[in-house]
Image (cartoon, rainbow, N blue to C red):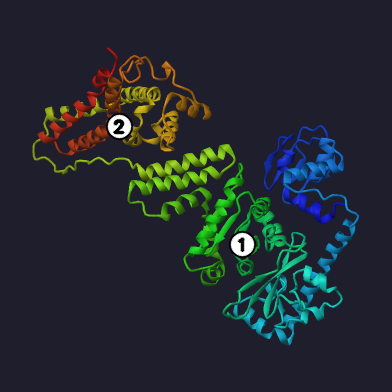
Amino acid sequence: MLTPQWLDELKSRITLSSLVQKTVNLQRAGREWKACCPFHNEATPSFYVNDQKGFYHCFGCQAHGSAIDWMIEQRGLQFMDAVKELAAEAGMEVPAPDPRAAERAEKRASLHDVMQAAQDWFVARLASDEGVGARRYLEKRGLSQRMIEQFGFGYAPDDKLAIKQALSQFDEAMLVEAGLLIAVDDKLPYARFRGRLMLPIQDARGRVIAFGGRILESRDGIAKYLNSPDTPLFDKGRTLYNIHRAGAASRKTERVIAVEGYMDVIALAQAGFEDVVAPMGTALTETQVELLWRMADKPVLCFDGDAAGQRAAMRAAERTLPLLRPGHSLQIVQLPAGLDPDDLVKQRGAAAMETLLARPKSLLDLIWEHEREAQPLTSPEDKAGLKERLLDHVAAIQHPDIKSLYKRELLDLYGRLAFPQREFKKREWTQKRSTNIIDFVEEKRRRDALKHSAALTKQEQYLRNRLGSALTAGLLRRPYLIPAHAADIFAIPEVELDPRLRLLIEAWQDGLELDPITMGAVLKTAGQELPKPEDYGRLRFTFVWPRASDDDAEKSLEKGVGLYAGLPEWKELLARVNASFEQDLRDEIYVEQQRLRAQVEDFLPSIRKLLVA
């Protein structure tokens, strides 16, 4: 027998839009997906899929259902066949037929009754004389009565047998199974929660499935927080605290915030942030990430600003990388050092929290910053270690496109750190107005110089573009020359670098040998191919020409790279000299201008020297 609870669990593990999208072209529509209905002909989309609510609905033909209904109606499967196929996709085992299944389902339902009775009793204890210390604690924390009632605060007396006596209408074994009593061999079962402020943990339907208890005063050897153990109702790795409230709120805000603990959730709720959840005192699990993605495509993880909070952020990142899929990621907000969300909103107000939430850090940025700061980068070995750690994270990503993009962006960041662009020294000029009289000859000389300089621009750029294409072709034809000229290549602005050449540079950075077979495989994987003659024009550069010797190719390529990277530097210096010349017509500035102009004008003859004879 398949119990309602088992079927609910199955549906919760299936992302309905991913299932429907296998046969229907869904398009984003806010928090939902839409398409033309697959059950009737229509020109305007009226078929919607809602992952948060777990159902599809057509406003035209009124087709409506869950993932199981979809498999039956769209795929034509029988109920059990649909369940088995979905269970296989979700990694669940279909329960075998068992005559005792109905009895277990009834028992499970009755555990909900046990938990609700316990919750009612804890709330009553808080309001009694026994709860005076707990009420003072709540007052000290600044919680309003509305928050106390909304989140169901209660109190567990410091008595080993009180709850067993209070819930005597239930079998003792059920109290043990619900996690309210601890059974020890040869001893009477006794209360798990004693002398603690109690918080109910609820499922997505708002039913109490577990409890969290906090001590009122710190005591050596006593854990500050104590959760229910895993039970038939409660699996801490598959549960998010406050999910039943945050789910509704997130549909309005199109956001969900995950914090570290219960009290953070409640503090933010009191400050007006209702779309907040928390894991159950453990690192964020894969299932919890999927639950968050049902509420928002990019949940915001908000961690304390201490070292433990930073470690928690990285653990969440590592758990999430293999799960990444298009449009779904995580955003991270790290609070100021020494503050948790409760401290922040109390000391700086809700506006400070809104400001942080408006500037979250991406998952990629978190990984880069964490690994960059993890160890000193004072030697080549340190920098190589950074690259290795970054690539280890990339290797965890399963989606091929996302993996490729993460690799490229992280290696771009690494390249700018490990191979910074070279800075050239710029000569400083003293702008001192000449005392000479500007006569007709000098004025004409100035105008001619500026005019000639401007006239070169288009021609220079045209020739430089052809040289750049030829350099790419030469390096692609002779990739073994890349390592020798890596520094010069990195000095070329990224926007001018052919994507094929960047792919080979990345492959070399990854430790691959740049032989023709590897090069072809790298380019083919990225959908690229070797350059054709038309890619670099008719100029037959030595470093491109197939019959050129390796020695000639290497020498001419070195000159070509220098020319390509050097022209912008010469032009910048020439522009500065021209600007000085407008103000100061001294002969020495004129001489410098002519020298630089000659260097720029030598660009074309120098290119010709690189051509095959």
Front in this rendered view, residue 490 or 570: 490
The location of residue 363, given as percent across then percent down, is: 53, 50
Mark linked to residue 282: 1
Q: CA distance from mark 1 to mark 2?
A: 53 Å
At mark 1, the secondary structure is loop
Quadrant of the rendering where the C terminus is positioned: top left
Q: Residue at x 45, y 32 (%)?
A: 503
Q: Residue at x 62, y 63 (%)?
A: 273
Task: Give the residue number, with chain letter if any, for mark 2.
Answer: 565
Residue 393 visible in the shown view:
yes
The nearer-to-camera label among 1 and 2 is: 1
Locate residue 518 relative to residue 86 in the image: left or right.
Answer: left
Residue 62 visible in the shown view:
no
Q: Amino acid at mark 1?
A: Thr
The location of residue 22, given as percent across then percent down, is: 72, 36
Q: Amino acid at mark 2?
A: Ala
At mark 2, the secondary structure is helix
